[in-house]
Structure formats: C-alpha cells, structure tokens
C-alpha cells in the first residue's frame, strides 16, 4: 500500500503560499505604526527576529511590508502606488527578490523531568524541531511522550537540561509571548460551555487582542481563513457537541492556526478517529509543515500513518530516546521490537518506509 501524503483533505497549490492569500484581508494595525502589521512582544521580551508580518503568512495572508505595493495601496501613500522612494513604493532593491523565509527552531537538550525525585519520567531527551518539517513522537504507553509535550509547552519545568525556542529559554517567554509563536492542539476536543465553532476559533486570537480582548475585523478575517483551511467554515454556527470527532479535531486545529503560530504541537490528534479522518489530519499537518513552513510536532500511537507522513520520527522508551531520524532509517525490525516488546514484521509499502505488523 502506497500512501501519497499530500493527496487527501487539503486543497492543492504549488506556490508555497495559501490560496486564500488573495482575499484582500486588510493589514492589522499597530499602535506605533499604522502602515504595517508586526507582532509586538510583551514589554519584558526581546523583539522577535524576522521580517515584520511573517506571522500573517502562516495563515496565507500576505504580510504587508513598508515597501510593498500592497502596503502602499493600503495606506494611501503616493499616487497609483508611488511614493518618494520610487516606483510602486519600492526602494533600490530588486523587485523580484523574495523575502527570506523565517525559520523557527525548537531545541531540547538533555531534558530530564521527575514527578518524584527518585522516579525520572524523562531522561536526557535531546532533539530539534525545525520549520518546514513534521516530527512525530512515537512510543508505548508510559514512555514519557505526554510529559515531554507538557515540557515543550512550558506547563512543566524540566529538572535538568535546556529547552530553547529560537535560541531563547522557553521559560523566559510570557504566556502571551509564547502563544504568539507556539500553538497546542489537545488530544480530546472539549469546551466547558456551548460556544459555537466560530467563538472557539476566535479564542485563538487571545495572544493578539488588546487589553480588553475585543474582537476586531482582522481577528474575524483570520478566524475565517483558519476555518477555511481546516474545512470547518460551514460549521461556524454549530457547537462541539454537534460535531463528529474528526470535525471537532479540525476545529481545534483551526483555533491553533488563529494564533498565527510558527510552531504547532499536537497530542495524539487522531487517537479516536477513523481512517479517513486520520489521513485528513495527517495531510493537514503535512501541509502546515511543508507549505506554510511551520515546525509541527505530533505525539502519536498511529505508527504506520505517522511514518508514512512524517519527515522525522522520535522513538521513546522509558523516558529515553531509543532512535530518531527519517522514517526510512529508524523503521527497523530490531528497533521496533525493542521499542514495543513485541514481534515485528515489516511489509514493503512501495516506498522506503515499511508497514508494521505486530504479533505477540
């Protein structure tokens, strides 16, 4: 069985920019600069590295630069898109020069964590999650996968080791500052109140709203785009209780996308889904990594589906990394038998990643 990991569930495009980027969404205004959109850090934080507006590009909204024709048109500078810098508001730079993509990196080095002093749950875990790649974390129950995810989210503080985002200790980010870069999709979609899908997705905008948390036209536009990307726009007026498991999981991904993150962490997003919805979610994660240049980290038990879609696998056993690397290199019988303590048979799938059949 050969699985084309880009053939299901997400609209095709080849430009590396979301097809909804041409909807003409206006730029978000900044208090200190009414011409361009820029994510501003909290007062105690360093300014994020990268071009202004790169966060919007995660949702397929072309970020407005000071020197772009779109920015000139939006701000009314000059005549027919011209200003003092020359034709169409550009300076001496080449008009066909594309902005360098922003590459965010999450690095774990020697992470150790214990709920009790004499019982370490994580033991010296080291890996790197890079923009443009889907990393799937696999392992048996009790191997430390969920604890690792909680450390990555900043919910748990490692007892040893370092966790850095773009070279900066994750613990030094405020909650709002971290939410502007990192989004989380839980294993079980749930809401304590009967919020509609649109209201839930708009909650993902909390990192970008003002002190009063008031929703702007830009917030609504971003939420709409997020729902379009995850195929749940037609569900906007329904509640989670009215949705199937696959639909609810797409809503949670839409809420995470509304944060305009650069990194997305997902906790077993397909654990309760049928095969079609598993493929839908994995293809969606692949698109986020490859076409929107996100770093995507997914904890999973679906070894065959994960291996067919992931760029990298991280195999965990008893709180340690047993193996990591591209699926074609780590999906070996000896490694998998040691990982799961069962007999493993590998079946040719038609590509360099075999299918796994387990027997007691």
Image (spheres, grey):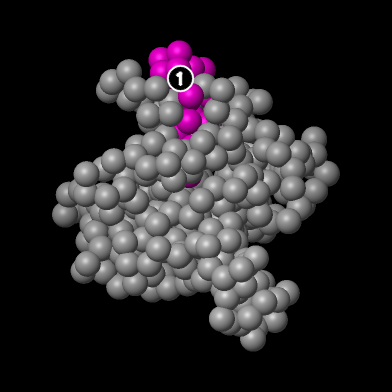
Determine whether, in the image, residue 222 is placed left or right of residue 20. left
Q: Is any part of residue 214 visible from this angle? A: yes
| Res 338 visible | no
Corner quadrant of residue 232: top right
Q: Indicate left or right for 23 with 223 as reference.
A: right
Quarter of the C terminus within the rendering: top right
Q: Which residue is rendered at x = 26% and y = 43% of the image? A: 213
| Residue extending farthest bottom | 92
112, above or below 236, in the image: below
The residue range painted magenta reads 236-258
- Helix, strand or loop: magenta stretch: helix
From this viewpoint, which residue is outermost toward the left? 117
Question: How many numbered marks does the figure carry?
Answer: 1
Read off the residue under disc 1. 237
Indicate the position of residue 142 as horizontal and vertical percent values.
37, 40
Q: Secondary structure at mark 1?
A: loop
Q: On screen, 357 above or below 351?
A: above
Residue placed at 26% from the left, 69% from the top?
45
User: Residue 68 location, x and y as percent?
Assistant: 59, 69
Residue 292, picture quadrant? bottom right
Would residue 185 be counted in the magenta stretch? no
252 in the magenta segment:
yes
| Left or right relative to 299: residue 110 | left
Residue in view at x 75 percent, y 39 percent: 7
Relative depth, front residue between 95 and 86:
86
């Amino acid at each position: 069985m050969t699985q084309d990991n880009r053939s299901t569930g997400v609209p095709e495009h080849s430009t590396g920019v979301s097809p909804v980027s041409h909807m003409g969404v206006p730029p978000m205004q900044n208090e200190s600069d009414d011409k361009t959109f820029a994510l501003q850090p909290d007062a105690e934080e360093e300014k994020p590295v990268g071009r202004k507006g790169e966060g919007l590009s995660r949702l397929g909204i072309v970020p407005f630069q000071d020197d772009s024709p779109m920015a000139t048109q939006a701000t009314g500078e000059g005549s027919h898109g011209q200003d003092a810098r020359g034709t169409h508001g550009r300076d001496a730079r080449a008009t066909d020069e594309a902005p360098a993509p922003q590459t965010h990196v999450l690095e774990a080095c020697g992470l150790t964590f214990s709920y009790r002093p004499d019982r370490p749950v994580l033991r010296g875990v080291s890996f790197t999650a890079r923009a443009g790649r889907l990393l799937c974390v696999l392992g048996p129950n009790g191997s430390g996968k969920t604890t690792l995810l909680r450390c990555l989210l900043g919910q748990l503080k490692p007892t040893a080791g370092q966790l850095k985002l773009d070279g900066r200790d994750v613990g030094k980010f405020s909650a709002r500052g971290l939410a502007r870069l990192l989004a989380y999709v839980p294993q079980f979609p749930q809401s304590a109140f009967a919020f509609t899908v649109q209201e839930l997705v708009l909650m993902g905008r909390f990192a970008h709203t003002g002190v009063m948390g008031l929703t702007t036209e830009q917030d609504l536009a971003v939420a709409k785009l997020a729902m379009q990307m995850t195929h749940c726009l037609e569900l906007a007026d329904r509640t989670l209780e009215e949705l199937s498991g696959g639909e609810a999981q797409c809503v949670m991904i839409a809420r995470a996308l509304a944060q305009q993150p650069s990194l997305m962490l997902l906790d077993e997003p397909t654990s309760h889904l049928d095969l079609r919805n598993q493929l839908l979610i994995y293809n969606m994660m692949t698109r986020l990594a490859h076409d929107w240049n996100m770093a995507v980290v997914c904890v999973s038990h679906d070894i065959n589906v994960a291996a067919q879609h992931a760029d990298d696998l991280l195999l965990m056993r008893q709180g340690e990394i047993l193996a990591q690397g591209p699926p074609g290199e780590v999906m070996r019988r000896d490694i998998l038998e040691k990982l799961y303590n069962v007999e493993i048979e590998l079946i040719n799938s038609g590509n360099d990643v075999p299918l796994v059949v387990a027997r007691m």
